[in-house]
Every structure is written in C-alpha cells, then in structure tokens.
Image: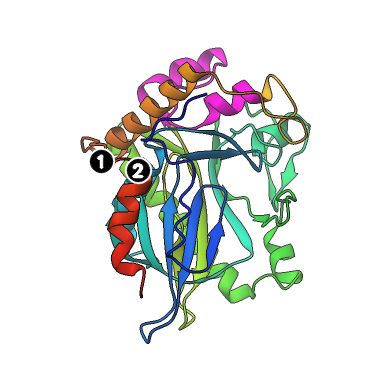
Amino acid sequence: MTVSPRTLTEAVIPELPNYYRGKVRDCYDLPDTGVGERRILIASDRLSAFDRILACIPWKGQVLTQIARHWFDRTGDICPNHVLAYPDPNVVIGRKLEILPVEVVVRGYLAGTTGTSVLTMYKQGVRQMYGHTLPEGLRDNQALPAPIITPTSKAFDGGHDEPLTAAEIVGQGLLPKALWDQVAEVALALFERGQTAAAERGLILVDTKYEFGLDAEGKLRIADEIHTPDSSRYWKADGYAAAFEVGARPPSFDKDVIRAWVAARCDPYKDDIPEIPGDMIAQTSAVYMDAFEAITGQTFVPDESGDSVLERIRANLSPWFTR
C-alpha cells in the first residue's frame, strides 16, 4: 500500500537526542540546560488499539495535537499541564514528568470493546469491577448512574493493562493515598468539564483516558493529550437516543469503527492484524477532521507546507537540534 507523504508513520530525527518511541508519539528528551528537563513529543498518524498499531491515518497527528491544545487551554484552572511550546502542528515541547504508574480512565456510559472495558466485563456477568458495583439490568451504551474511574496498571514489554481498584493502587504502593485522592478528584472534575463543553457542541463525552505525572517540584500535571478522539469516546448527541432504543451503536467520533472491523476478523491480542482497507482509512481520516471541527468549533486546516509532514517537522524543530 502506498503511503502519502502527508501521512506521518514515524518521526525519526537523528539530530535530536534520546529517542523514545511510544505507541502513537515519537519522543526526544532534551538535556537540562538550566531550565528543567524537557521532552519533544511528535504526534504520528499511527492508530493504536488492543495494545497494537492497527493503521496510519492521514492528518490524525495534527488533529490530536490541536484538539489537545484546545482542551489544555480550557482546563488549566482544574489542573496544570506539561505544555511549554507548540513549534509545529504535530509537536509539543513539554516538561519532562515522572509519569504515574496508573492509567486513569473515566467512564460515563456502559460502553467499549476492549477486554478491560466495562461493557465487555458486564456482558461476561461481572458486576463488581474497578472497586465499583454496577446495578443489574443495564443495557449496552446506557449512561451509568454516575461517572466512575476505572484505573488500570500500565503495561510494559508487550503486556496487557490490568484492572485496578483504588484500594489496590494504594495497597500495592503504586501511589500514596493522598496523591491518588488528588488524581481521582482532578480526573472527575476534568471529565465533568469535558462533558459539559461537549454537550454545548452537540456531543456526548462517553469516556476518556488521562495521563498524569509529577514535575520536578512534585506538582501534579496532565501529560500526553486530553479529550481527543484517540483518548476519548465521543457520540453525536442527536443520534444517541434512536440508536440506544434499538440497541445499535451510537454515531461516534472515535476509533471504534476500525477496532470493531479488526475484532470481527481476528483475535486482535494474538493474531496478525489484517490490512485495513484504503477506503476505511480515508473515511477514518475524514472522521478525525470532522471531530476536530465538531469538538472545537473551528475549521480544520491541514498544514501542507514542506515536501512531507516529516520534513516540515524537521524544519520547525531545527532550532532545538543544539538545545
């Protein structure tokens, strides 16, 4: 399959130091020159699910970076974030944080497709999960009585995230109780802010993942991204009721379309991932761009400067090669 130069599969830049490749982001740690440790985070167009890379979606990296910027700018009163600068539409220069060893997911609905989602577990007969007890009789995609936090461990070396309870987080020494209480309070406040703002845009923020870390002074900050279609599930409010009534999947702005396509054709945790059809990739790219406009209320303008996305990023990051 031919990959467009406007698709950023990876961002390997030899002039930058201390390369680290994440599932979606390519990162570089800059040396401390008296202003604190900093990290360059470049959002690629890789789409991750089931602890794997499923495909690359044109413009996805720019969409995610700019949606996160939109939300970071609107949530600083709840919790500070890691951002120092935006030198390119796909790039953030941020404070290097000590990332907390717990993945924080807030859920407002009985939804999801992964093995750790509340819907999957509920369908398996589980009613006590993540330290919460869910009532009998809930239907697929129904609103929960109140948003809940469903934390998981952070998987390393190809492992899978494992469900945790608040008691286990503290009991296993993953986080002190005071810090976990702060994280939980902040996460629920961020989710409430996100749901309120999404509703004003005709959207439902269904669930979301937050990445938290501590800066050099020990202050809690949000890292990575916030309320993007990669870290969150959005439904369109005007189609939700009809879909819920007939048990159908609500119209969405998340990556569940590709997730569902893959899950229907293989065991995504064990089998080789079949190649995603080109038309589905193009449709997903359009969905991401539509999501940007629906979430932010702004027109998405792809940055087509440079011979490719990578060359544009290299040019914009060149002042940082010697820092």
Disc 2 target residue: 309
Describe the element under mark 2 as helix, strand or loop: helix
- Which residue type carries mark 2? Val
Cα–Cα span, label 2 and label 1: 8 Å
Q: Residue at x 36, y 36 (%)?
A: 59
Q: Are marks 2 and 1 in contact (CB under 8 Å)?
A: yes
Quarter of the image where the C terminus is located = bottom left
Q: Residue at x 25, y 38 (%)?
A: 304
Of badges 2 and 1, nearer the viewer stands: 2
- Is disc 1 surrounded by few (<14), some (14 to 19) or many (20+) residues within 10 Å? some
Q: Which residues are magenta?
A: 235-262
Describe the element under mark 1 as helix, strand or loop: loop
Disc 1 target residue: 303
Nearer the observer, 211 or 132: 211
Q: Position of residue 56 (x, y in %)?
A: 49, 34
Disc with the residue nearer the chain's start (2 vs 1): 1
Q: Quadrant of residue 318?
A: bottom left
* Residue 89 horizontal side relative to residue 179, left or right: left
- Which residue type carries mark 1? Asp
Q: Residue at x 32, y 60 (%)?
A: 317
